[in-house]
Image (spheres, grey):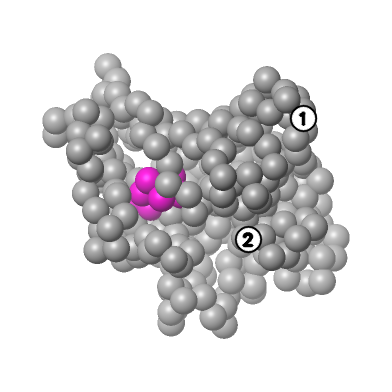
Amino acid sequence: MKNLQHFEIDHVIRFQTNRYGLTEMLISNDAAEAVIYLRGGNLTHFQPRGESAVIFGGETCEMHPEKTLHAGIPICWPWFGPHPTDSDKPQHGFARNKEWEVRETEQLANGETRVVLGLHEDEETLELFEHMFDLTLTFTIGKQLLIDLRTYNSNAEPFHFTQALHNYFATSDIGNVLIQGVEETPFVDLADDHKKKQESDLLLIDRILNRIYEPTDQACALFDKGAKRKIYIDKGGSRATTIWNPGKESGLHDLPGDDYRRFVCIETCNAGQDIITLESGASHHITQKITIA
């Protein structure tokens, strides 16, 4: 914790450890509050002033050193879902399980707070992904939440990767929710034997959902009549959107009872056929802006 003190900002950013010894960054400014775990670079809480929490799980779920957290905004990298050729490798890659370093914190003139985290290869990652890389994860926290994940190829050769900003959005109840932005977009239904489908109506969450929509660079909107709000998700550098809710019988250790009714995942992705090939010395950015109306 001592080496993090110079990243603290009086009355805005401080660090603490949870009961499992994992480091949390607590951000509070005039516009919003947020919590980011250094493990996984996972933002588990975002709440603009005067609003209820936007991200699911920030107040009830804790990051654990040996268990996956189904909450926040996990970073899926360098593959999305199961590894394409080796099922023994971790689901959604390794970035969500690694300790990220703090590279920069700044209080901006407009009142927003900017946080920059980083991750690069080590002996463990090279066993799973035989390439050198540098990831830069930038959060800008204000009335809006901006996220930029930059991948830099420091390898001598090109490499391929998929990824996602795996957003868990808090809902009053999934029965109150409509999702706009994927109508008329083809999707692969992973919950129905990977069948290719297409629908024209706004999306209801009335079944298990596990879909990859592509190609799409469109923004999505989550309408929640119970919370009386709309969440807009604009994105860049992404040609796929994943929507997921596991349903009641998920068996996931940290989603007991009716917790599945309190969120839906709308994910900014490079997934499915949207595979990024990155040349040596090149960068790719995947970005999103989350706005409350």
Residue at the extreme top: 109
Q: In the image, is residue 192 above or below residue 242? A: below
Which label sits in the foreground, 1 or 2? 1
Could you say where residue 94 lies in the image, as x and y percent from the top left? 57, 51
User: From where the camera sits, is residue 257 visible?
Assistant: yes
Could you say where residue 123 lies in the image, as x and y percent from the top left? 56, 45
In this rendering, position of residue 94 left or right of residue 197: left
- The N terminus sits in image quarter: top left
Residue 201, image quadrant = bottom right
Tag 2: Cα neighbours inside 10 Å, few (<14), some, or many (≥20)?
some
Residue positioned 65% across, 67% down in the render: 209
Earlier sequence position, callout 1 versus callout 2: 2
Mark number for residue 236?
Answer: none
Q: In the image, is residue 200 above or below residue 289? A: below
Q: CA distance from mark 1 to mark 2?
A: 23 Å
Residue indicated by mark 1: 158
| Label pair 1/2, CB-CB below 8 angstroms | no
- The C terminus sits in image quarter: top left
Residue indicated by mark 2: 91
User: Is the stretch drawn in magenta largely helix, strand or loop?
Assistant: strand
The one nearer the camera, 68 or 32, is 68
Residue positioned 43% across, 73% down in the render: 254
- Tell me the magenta residue range: 37-46
Residue type at the position of mark 2: Gln
The one nearer the camera, 160 or 249, is 160
Residue positioned 75% across, 35% down in the render: 159
Could you say where residue 67 lies in the image, as x and y percent from the top left? 45, 67
Residue 211, image quadrant = bottom right
